[in-house]
C-alpha cells in the first residue's frame, strides 16, 4: 500500500508540483523548502504522519559501518542543509543519514548570484554558493541539546573569503573549525572534510600530495573522536586521485566520498544551450555520474579494504544507487535527484534496492558492495 502512495507522490510531483516549483527562483525555493522541512520536524505528529506515508524500511538495507548504525544506505549530501534545518524531518521521509554543511570556521554570505540554477535537459543543478553558511559557532549553538534519530555528520571546509589566505592560514582555519566541533556536545556521528569545492576564492588547494599531507597531519593531531570521511574531486585524473588516496591512506581516515561537482563543461550529459545561461559555477546531477562511478570503482579496487567508500553524483533512482553499490560504495548520498524527482525519491530508492538485492540472490545489501568493481 505504501509503495502505491510513493508512486502516486512521484507522479504528482513530476507532473504537477514540480512544474509550479520550477517557475520560481531556485534559491528562493531551496530556502522555502528547508524552512518548511524544519517546521514539519518540530512536531512529532507531523513527523509520524510523514513517516507513515513516505518511509520505507527493510532489514536487508541496514548496516553498521565504522561503528555507526545506518538503517539504509541513502543519505543527504552536504550542500543542501547548510543551515541545519532538516535533522528532525529527514528520517521520516526515508533517509538513512545526513551531512550538514559544508560549515566553515567563519560565516560566509555566499558568492554573487546566481548561486543556484536548474538545467532540466541536463538533469543538473548549477551550484555556486561557495560554502554559504552561518559559521560553525552559530550551527553548534543551534543544534545544542538536539537529539537525532539517525546519523548526522558535519562537513567542514575552508572559510571562503575574498581576502587572500595563505596555505598555512587555510589549514589553521579548517583545524579551528574541527576543534570547535570536537568541543561541542552536539551528537555528530561523523565528520566530512570537504577539500574539493570548486567555487572558492583564492589559490589555496589541498590537492597536491604535500598540501594534503600537511592538512591531514594537522587534523590527525587533534585525535578526532569520530570517523572522518574526505570529500573528493571528480575532475582529476586517475593518477592524481591515486596520489591523493595514497596520502589519505597513511592517516586515520575512515572513508572517501566520490565526489563533488562537475567542472568539465564538455561532459556529454550537458545540454550546451542550458550551459550558456550559467557562465560561472559548476554542476551537480547526471553530468557527475560517469566520473563518480569510475572513481568509486578505482578506489574500491585499490583501497576497498582500507576505506569506506561513499558514492555521490547523479542518483535519480534505485538503479543508479545500486550501480554505485556494486562498484564499491557502501553508502550513497544525493541532492539533485531529490529536486528533480521529489521527496518520495529516497523511499522509492530503498524499495527498489531491496527488490534488486533479492532478485540478485543476496540476503543483504552488504553482499552486493563491489561485485562489479
Image (tube, grey):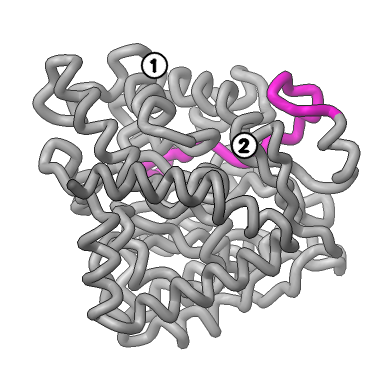
- Residue 271 spot, x, y in % from top left: 78, 28
Tell whether 63 sits left or right of 120.
left
* Residue at x-position 52% and y-position 65%: 81
Q: Return the residue at label 2.
A: 233
Helix, strand or loop status at disc 2? loop
Read off the magenta span: 250-272
Tell me how many marks there are: 2
Assess whether mark 2 and mark 1 are in contact (beta carbons under 8 angstroms).
no
Instruction: Point out the image quarter for the C terminus.
Output: top left
Q: Is residue 239 above or below residue 229?
A: above
User: For residue 265: magenta?
Assistant: yes
- Say the numbered circle drawn on residue 301: 1
- Residue 87 spot, x, y in % from top left: 38, 70
- Residue 138 spot, x, y in % from top left: 54, 84
- Is 192 in front, or is 276? 276
* Mark 1 or 2, nearer chain start: 2
- Residue 224 spot, x, y in % from top left: 37, 61
- Is 245 in front, or is 16? 16
Name the chief secondary structure element in magenta: loop
* Residue at x-position 61% and y-position 18%: 239
Q: Is residue 215 visible?
A: no
* Residue at x-position 35% and y-position 76%: 41
User: For residue 371: magenta?
Assistant: no
| Disc 2 residue crowd, few under 14, some 14–19, many 20+, Cα 10 Å | many
Amino acid at each position: 500500500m505504501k509503495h502505491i502512495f510513493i508512486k502516486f507522490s512521484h507522479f504528482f510531483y513530476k507532473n504537477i508540483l514540480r512544474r509550479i516549483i520550477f517557475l520560481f527562483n531556485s534559491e528562493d525555493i531551496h530556502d522555502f523548502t528547508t524552512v518548511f522541512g524544519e517546521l514539519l520536524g518540530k512536531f512529532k505528529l507531523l513527523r509520524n504522519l510523514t513517516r507513515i506515508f513516505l518511509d520505507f524500511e527493510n532489514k536487508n538495507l541496514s548496516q553498521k559501518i565504522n561503528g555507526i548504525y545506518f538503517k539504509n544506505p541513502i543519505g543527504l549530501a552536504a550542500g543542501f542543509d547548510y543551515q541545519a534545518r532538516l535533522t528532525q524531518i529527514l528520517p521520516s521521509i526515508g533517509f538513512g543519514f545526513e551531512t550538514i554543511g559544508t560549515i566553515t570556521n567563519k560565516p560566509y554570505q555566499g558568492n554573487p548570484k546566481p548561486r543556484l540554477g536548474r538545467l532540466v535537459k541536463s538533469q543538473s543543478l548549477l551550484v555556486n554558493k561557495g560554502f554559504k553558511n552561518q559559521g560553525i559557532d552559530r550551527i553548534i549553538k543551534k543544534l545544542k541539546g538536539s537529539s537525532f534519530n539517525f546519523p548526522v555528520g558535519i562537513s567542514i571546509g575552508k572559510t571562503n573569503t575574498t581576502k587572500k589566505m595563505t596555505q598555512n592560514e587555510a589549514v589553521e582555519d579548517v583545524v579551528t573549525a574541527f576543534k570547535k566541533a570536537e568541543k561541542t556536545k552536539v551528537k555528530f556521528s561523523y565528520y566530512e572534510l570537504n577539500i574539493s569545492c570548486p567555487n572558492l576564492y583564492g589559490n589555496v588547494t589541498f590537492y597536491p600530495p604535500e598540501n594534503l599531507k600537511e592538512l591531514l597531519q594537522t587534523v590527525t593531531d587533534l585525535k578526532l573522536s569520530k570517523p572522518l570521511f574526505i570529500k573528493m574531486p571528480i575532475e582529476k585524473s586517475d593518477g592524481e586521485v591515486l596520489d591523493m588516496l595514497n596520502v589519505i591512506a597513511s592517516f586515520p581516515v575512515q572513508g572517501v566520498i566520490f565526489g563533488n561537482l562537475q567542472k568539465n563543461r564538455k561532459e556529454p550529459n550537458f545540454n550546451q544551450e542550458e550551459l550558456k545561461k550559467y557562465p560561472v559555477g559548476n554542476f551537480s546531477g547526471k553530468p557527475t555520474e560517469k566520473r563518480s562511478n569510475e572513481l568509486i570503482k578505482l578506489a574500491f579496487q585499490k583501497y576497498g579494504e582500507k576505506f569506506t567508500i561513499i558514492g555521490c553524483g547523479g542518483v535519480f533512482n534505485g538503479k543508479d544507487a545500486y550501480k554505485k553499490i556494486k562498484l564499491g560504495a557502501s553508502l550513497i548520498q544525493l541532492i539533485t535527484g531529490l529536486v528533480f524527482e521529489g521527496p518520495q525519491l529516497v523511499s522509492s530508492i530503498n524499495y527498489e534496492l531491496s527488490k534488486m538485492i533479492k532478485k540478485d540472490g543476496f540476503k543483504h545489501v552488504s553482499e552486493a558492495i563491489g561485485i562489479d568493481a
